[in-house]
């Protein structure tokens, strides 16, 4: 399955779409979720398409992709600069039926903005269960939803979201243990950070309860132009330090012009991620998740196939 979406995130291709699962916590609802019949959903989608610029947008690109029917109201409860070009949002989604799998995205509905955005969730499902919050990170672009996030969005702004996407990591307790290799370029880190955080939650659950899914090791390869464009650096390194031997990262910068800070230097490589670095991680127990610019994603997915990694173990999502 191959689809495209969003202004800062775009295409998805996976070989193993799964079932809808997930549990959510409970607090008082902001508003009743919109349980729209199929005809109303089609009308909502077509109305947005007719009002959009004729350049293919998120809803058109993802028309064939699995998504939930429930459109849930959400409120902005936090906003901050994640990098010079990326703004992060925290959304309170009180609807108890709203849930997602690590790696999925949301249709992002903004009152008064006819174009529907498509943004990957970068938080873990556990955060939603515990606090009813999801996190997004939106890169600046000349696209109505992204412009709204950067120029008009304020605390308590009201929006609506609907979960979609077939790129996710959602193991069940009895599934075979797997190692993960996550390969990210630029803002392609967003869905992979959700997966990384979910993996950390699974490690914690196993340590605390001695039960649940037994995940193997996780290695993140993450490339950006400079350390200032490496999103969520502190969050990533905190997980590496919390789970030594279980979670590791290799951070790459391709156009660094300033000195690299001492806290980052042990993890930084100047230059692109190479196929040689992946070689030691290829095994029958490893799943590869890739998200980044199309040339990068195409390169590594082809390389892994040529290295005899089973196709069902290679999952990717593209953005542009």
Image (tube, rainbow, N blue to C red):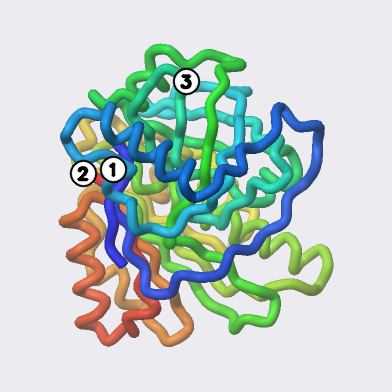
The x, y position of residue 271, in whole percent, is: 21, 50
The x, y position of residue 227, in whole percent, is: 34, 36
| Disc sitting over residue 224 in the figure | 1
| Residue at the limit of the structure toward the right, as seen here | 209
Q: Nearer the viewer, mark 2 or mark 3?
A: 3
Judged left or right of residue 243, residue 310 is: left
The x, y position of residue 206, in whole percent, is: 74, 68
| Disc sitting over residue 254 in the figure | 2
Q: Nearer the viewer, mark 3 or mark 1?
A: 3
Name the residue: 62% across, 58% down: 200
Residue 53 vs 272, above or below: the answer is above
Name the residue: 43% across, 61% down: 167
**Spatial distance from mark 2 to mark 3, Cα to Cα?**
39 Å
Counting residues from the N terminus, which is met first, the one under dot 2 or under dot 1? 1
Judged left or right of residue 96, residue 120 is: left
Crowdedness of circle 1 by 10 Å Cα count: few (<14), some, many (20+)? Answer: many
Crowdedness of circle 2 by 10 Å Cα count: few (<14), some, many (20+)? Answer: some
Judged left or right of residue 139, residue 211 is: right
| Disc sitting over residue 111 in the figure | 3
| Disc sitting over residue 211 in the figure | none
Give 107 or 279, whichever is nearer the viewer.
107
Q: Quadrant of residue 230?
A: top left
Q: Nearer the viewer, mark 2 or mark 1?
A: 1
Mark 2 secondary-structure assignment: loop
**Spatial distance from mark 2 to mark 1, Cα to Cα?**
6 Å
Quadrant of the drawing holding the N terminus: bottom left
Name the residue: 67% across, 64% down: 203
**Spatial distance from mark 3 to mark 1, Cα to Cα?**
33 Å
């Amino acid at each position: 399955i191959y689809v495209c979406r969003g202004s800062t995130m775009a295409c998805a291709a996976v070989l193993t779409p799964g079932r809808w699962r997930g549990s959510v916590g409970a607090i008082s609802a902001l508003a009743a979720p919109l349980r729209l019949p199929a005809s109303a959903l089609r009308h909502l989608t077509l109305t947005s398409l007719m009002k959009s610029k004729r350049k293919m947008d998120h809803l058109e690109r993802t028309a064939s992709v699995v998504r939930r029917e429930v459109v849930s109201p959400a409120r902005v409860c936090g906003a901050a600069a994640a990098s010079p070009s990326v703004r992060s949002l925290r959304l309170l989604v009180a609807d108890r039926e709203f849930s997602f799998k690590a790696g999925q995205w949301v249709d992002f509905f903004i009152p008064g903005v006819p174009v529907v955005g498509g943004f990957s969730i970068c938080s873990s499902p556990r955060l939603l269960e515990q606090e009813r919050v999801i996190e997004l990170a939106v890169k600046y672009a000349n696209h109505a939803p992204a412009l709204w996030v950067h120029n008009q969005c304020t605390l308590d702004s009201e929006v609506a979201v609907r979960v979609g996407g077939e790129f996710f990591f959602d193991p069940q307790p009895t599934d075979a243990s797997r190692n993960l290799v996550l390969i990210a370029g630029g803002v392609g880190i967003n869905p992979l950070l959700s997966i990384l955080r979910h993996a950390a939650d699974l490690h914690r659950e196993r340590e605390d309860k001695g039960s649940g899914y037994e995940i193997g090791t996780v290695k993140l390869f993450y490339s950006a132009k400079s350390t200032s464009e490496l999103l969520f650096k502190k969050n990533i390194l905190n997980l590496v330090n919390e789970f030594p031997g279980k979670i590791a990262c290799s951070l790459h910068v391709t156009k660094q012009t300033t000195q690299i800070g001492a806290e980052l230097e042990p993890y930084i490589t100047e230059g692109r991620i190479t196929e040689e670095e992946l070689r030691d991680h290829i095994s029958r127990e490893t799943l590869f998740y890739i998200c980044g610019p199309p040339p990068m994603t195409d390169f590594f997915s082809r390389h892994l196939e040529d290295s005899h990694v089973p196709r069902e173990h290679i999952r990717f999502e593209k953005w542009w």
